[in-house]
């Protein structure tokens, strides 16, 4: 038994623990939403049925889930890289907008072969988002301002800048505040004709794999993680703390900018106000819940998107507002953050009651 | 103790397991009224665990505690305080932004109707401090007090609530000589007033100086209990480590010869600013040759940290120049200074020298992450090579680690220091800068580290050793100097000046006064 205990890895909470916590959180979320639905005078079982049926009613609804989760996953992966150095990238929305608008400009004005347009759009969107994020990181690294506050302020700057651009210099004819559409030839092909899902989702899978590889296998990832553990020790270790901290925020911003490009080229084909429905915040929430693990970010984003798609179709049939998604999300976040502590306390209390010989086994 | 005094505290058969490993194994401890009992043991012998059980911070897995012959259950520090047990922790539990009075008043839970009567408490504190001859300035913010006075505040705080048993966990670790003398006289006053004191230490001289009885712990067990004036230093050291200890590692024949002109480290008139932008290091120069150990003695906080940080590239040098092996390294990045051959053992081994939540391999790697040796294609880390190096260092440096995935933060201080030393020496340095490399370690580990430092010297490297332990500096150094208020004395051979002359230099007197 002792042998076993020594072998146990203590670096991270065990996989089983994480699963148990997630299940508990979902159970809590279901209980709270049942109360919510009952208070509206509806039947919870039929509401849930509508949500699930709605989400999986046909191929196109499933593809809709994929389409909805694509930008959230990309931004979430970026958030996990910033988090490695201890930065919180709450500027996902602004970076997304900057990436989207610069990609749209390339798509609309650059007359070149499709591949060149795509590559140019990707580079420019990453650069635009990266500068937006990197600036917040730069201020944090040099004059120690809060990157969270700066990033949120940068969100507003981006939001109003886009508002200005799509209603003035870049506005398409017709009076609606939006840009012209990008030519059909450069639009990303759909997975299945007629649906909203496009080949961007394939990028996402590759990107997640790439992020996992970088963070777990490479020197660069190790250096980023070391900064997050202790900047003091990292500096002593000869790691370029400031440079890499800014870089991690640049990458996070670049990812969000890239998500903007994917949305413009794959879904909307133009930029309009409100193209991001607070993807940035949702992505941060999911990344925290996933403990910054790429696979967890994918699963979390898919779950939230499923819920959103299901609720949108449920709303048509039953008198329950879509804000139930927010309620469920909030309860899940709350329980994931709180349940592990409660469980740990509970287990600790139980262990105390056991006689010492049995204690070692638990 | 001539007359058999009353037993006030008895701990019987105390056992405590962590992860199935016994930290305390069937420990019996008796304390009489008005007695100073020293708990002596190496790091990890179980001294602090035992006292934390007594103070209610841990609960024992087996065994019972009785006070005045009555079995008691202590589930929290509040219970302990109510039973008359006070504890002064190794790291002070004071609120730095509060003044001394507020800190003491905080611990007094006897409020009436939720109101605090400051007048009454103030009177009480004054009464106590006069009674026990503790000098307390009540209205000074704690963070502005010298460490010695902070400790007095801690002690006074612990004495409230009808304290009868005072536990002091490694109280002298942070004190300088004068503060230590003051502490010991306070403890004697307390003893005379009938208090029982449990004094945790691994410093033999102190134990011999202050205690009536010494209880020696080794690997979680009581190995002996001896009356202090019937034992001596060598005897205690032998019992504590379970073998004969060579006290001061003797300097063997050295490569070093003053005529050798190979200067590995040269510091020329540097000036460095401290944390609050005050000028801390003033016009400091020193030279270290191949195979030479240069020791810097001095009381903590006289510019030692700023000096080593400047050398390692972690602090800006405002004036002057530093040369490593003839190449200028002034204000270069810590990475390039390290690559040019300066190894560095920082003073803060837990938060700077290592990363607690990293494994041993990762702790070796974070200081070498730019080296090509551990890099595979696509920027991947060569974990196999790293593991092999880890294995070698564990063997060579006798690092005791239960399994390879264990986090370094869970190791004992001595083992953590071995990890750092192994990593730094294995980089084959030109110069090793070691700050407080043996602070807080047990005799066995100190001896081991000293031996390794001397080995490194004979391979031709230079060492800059900074320590507050004068014995260490004197027995190891070829040349030494004393730092005081950011100024370095002239270098001298350890046998050149007497202890009292060195002491005067440490106290800030200038060279002339020592002649």
Image: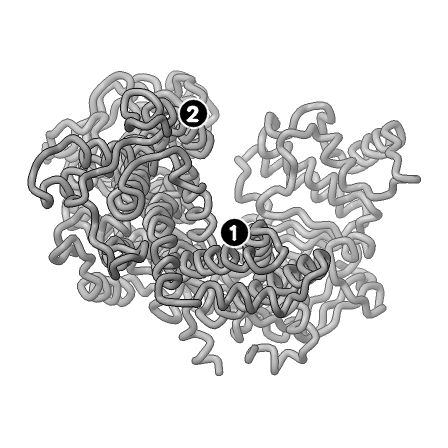
Which image quarter holds the N terminus of chain B?
A: bottom right
Instruction: Classify 10 Å Cα crowding around label 2: few (below 14), some (14-19), many (20 and above).
Output: few
Residue at figure coordinates x 40%, y 75% from the top left: A7
Residue at figure coordinates x 58%, y 29% from the top left: B146
Judged from this view, the residue extending furthest toward the right is: B113
Q: Nearer the viewer, residue A152 or A122?
A: A122
Q: Mark 1 or 2 closer to N-term?
A: 1
Of circles 1 and 2, which is in front? 2
Residue at figure coordinates x 88%, y 35% from the top left: B115
Tell me if A27 is positioned left or right of B121 in this view. Answer: left
Residue at figure coordinates x 26%, y 48% from the top left: A266
In the rendered image, residue B21, in percent from the top left (x then y), is placed at 52, 73
Can the viewer see residue A312? yes
Q: For the image shown, how many numbered marks are present on the structure? A: 2
Q: Is residue B364 above or below residue B193?
A: below
User: Same chain, marks 1 and 2?
Assistant: yes
User: Are the two marked residues, 1 and 2, in contact with CB atoms closer than 8 angstroms?
Assistant: no
Q: Nearer the viewer, residue B12 or B139?
A: B139
SS category of the residue bearing label 2: loop
Q: Nearer the viewer, residue A135 or B283?
A: A135
Q: Classify residue A217 by image quadrant.
A: bottom left
Residue at the disc numbered 2: B275
Q: Classify residue A179 by image quadrant.
A: top left
Q: Classify residue B339 by image quadrant.
A: top left
Residue at the disc numbered 1: B203
Q: Spatial distance from mark 1 to mark 2, Cα to Cα?
A: 32 Å
Tell me if B24 is positioned left or right of A62 in this view. Answer: right
Q: Nearer the viewer, residue B27 or A338?
A: A338
């Amino acid at each position: 038994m002792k042998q076993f205990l020594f072998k146990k890895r203590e670096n991270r909470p065990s996989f089983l623990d994480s699963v148990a916590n997630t299940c508990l959180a979902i159970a809590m979320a279901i209980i709270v939403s049942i109360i919510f639905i009952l208070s509206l005078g509806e039947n919870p079982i039929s509401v849930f049925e509508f949500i699930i049926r709605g989400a999986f009613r046909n191929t196109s609804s499933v593809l809709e889930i994929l389409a909805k989760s694509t930008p959230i996953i990309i931004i979430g992966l970026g958030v996990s890289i910033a988090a490695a150095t201890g930065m919180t990238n709450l500027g996902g929305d602004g970076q997304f907008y900057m990436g989207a608008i610069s990609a749209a400009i390339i798509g609309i004005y650059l007359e070149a072969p499709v591949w060149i347009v795509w590559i140019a759009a990707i580079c420019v969107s990453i650069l635009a988002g990266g500068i937006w994020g990197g600036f917040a990181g730069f201020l944090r690294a040099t004059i120690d301002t809060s990157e969270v506050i700066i990033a949120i302020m940068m969100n507003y700057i981006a939001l109003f800048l886009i508002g200005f651009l799509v209603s003035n210099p870049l506005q398409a004819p017709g009076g609606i505040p939006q840009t012209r559409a990008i030519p059909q030839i450069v639009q990303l092909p759909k997975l299945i004709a007629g649906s909203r899902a496009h080949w961007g989702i394939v990028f996402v899978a590759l990107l997640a794999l790439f992020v996992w590889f970088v963070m777990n296998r490479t020197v660069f990832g190790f250096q980023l993680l070391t900064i997050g553990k202790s900047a003091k020790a990292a500096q002593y270790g000869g790691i370029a703390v400031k440079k890499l901290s800014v870089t991690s925020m640049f990458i996070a911003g670049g990812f969000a900018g890239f998500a903007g490009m994917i949305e413009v080229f794959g879904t909307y084909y133009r930029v309009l106000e409100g193209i991001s429905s607070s993807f940035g915040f949702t992505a941060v929430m999911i990344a925290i819940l996933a403990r910054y693990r790429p696979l967890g970010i994918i699963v979390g984003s898919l779950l939230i998107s499923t819920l959103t798609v299901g609720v949108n179709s449920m709303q048509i049939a039953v008198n329950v507002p879509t804000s139930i998604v927010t309620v469920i999300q909030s309860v899940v976040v709350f329980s994931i953050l709180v349940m592990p502590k409660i469980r740990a306390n509970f287990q600790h209390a139980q262990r105390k009651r056991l006689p010492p010989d049995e204690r070692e086994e638990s | 103790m001539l007359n058999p005094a009353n037993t006030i505290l008895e701990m019987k058969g105390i056992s405590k397991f962590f992860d199935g490993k016994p930290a305390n194994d069937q420990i019996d401890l008796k304390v009489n009224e008005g007695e100073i009992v020293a708990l002596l043991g190496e790091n990890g012998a179980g001294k602090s665990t035992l006292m934390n059980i007594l103070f209610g911070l841990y609960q024992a897995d087996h065994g019972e505690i009785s006070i005045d012959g009555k079995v008691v259950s202590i589930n929290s520090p509040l219970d302990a305080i109510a039973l008359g047990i006070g504890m002064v922790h190794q790291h002070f539990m004071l609120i730095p932004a509060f003044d001394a009075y507020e800190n003491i008043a905080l611990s007094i839970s006897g409020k009436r109707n939720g109101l605090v009567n400051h007048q009454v408490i103030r009177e009480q504190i004054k009464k106590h401090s006069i009674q026990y001859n503790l000098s307390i300035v009540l209205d000074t913010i704690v963070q502005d007090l010298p460490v010695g006075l902070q400790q007095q505040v801690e002690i006074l705080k612990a004495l409230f609530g009808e304290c009868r048993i005072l536990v002091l966990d490694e109280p002298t670790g942070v004190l300088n000589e004068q503060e230590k003398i003051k502490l010991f006289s306070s403890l004697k006053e307390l003893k005379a007033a009938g208090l029982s004191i449990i004094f945790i230490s691994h410093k033999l001289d102190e134990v011999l100086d202050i205690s009536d009885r010494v209880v020696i712990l080794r690997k979680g067990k009581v190995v002996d209990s001896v009356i202090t004036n019937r034992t001596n230093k060598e005897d205690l050291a032998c019992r504590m480590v379970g073998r004969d200890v060579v006290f001061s590692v003797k300097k063997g024949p050295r490569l070093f010869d003053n005529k050798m002109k190979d200067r590995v480290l040269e510091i020329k008139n540097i000036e460095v600013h401290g944390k609050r932008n005050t000028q801390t290091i003033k016009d400091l120069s020193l030279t270290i040759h191949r195979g030479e150990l240069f020791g810097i003695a001095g009381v903590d906080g006289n510019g030692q940290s700023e000096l080593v940080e400047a050398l390692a590239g972690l602090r800006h040098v405002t004036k002057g120049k530093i040369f490593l092996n003839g190449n200028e390294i002034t204000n270069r990045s810590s990475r390039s200074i390290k690559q040019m051959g300066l190894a560095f053992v920082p003073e803060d081994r837990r938060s700077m020298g290592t990363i607690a939540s990293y494994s041993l391999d990762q702790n070796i790697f974070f200081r070498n992450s730019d080296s090509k040796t551990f890099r595979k294609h696509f920027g991947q880390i060569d974990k196999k090579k790293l593991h092999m190096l880890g294995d070698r260092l564990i063997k060579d440096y006798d690092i005791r680690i239960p399994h390879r995935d264990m986090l370094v933060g869970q190791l004992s201080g001595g083992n953590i220091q071995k990890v750092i030393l192994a990593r730094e020496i294995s980089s084959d340095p030109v110069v090793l800068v070691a700050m407080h490399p043996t602070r807080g370690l047990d005799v066995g580990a100190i001896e081991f580290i000293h031996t390794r430092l001397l080995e490194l010297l004979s391979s031709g490297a230079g060492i800059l050793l900074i320590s507050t332990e004068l014995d260490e500096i004197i027995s190891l150094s070829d040349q030494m100097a004393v730092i005081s208020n950011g100024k370095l004395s002239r270098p001298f051979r350890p046998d050149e000046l007497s202890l009292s002359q060195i002491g005067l230099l440490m106290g800030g007197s200038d060279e002339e006064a020592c002649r």
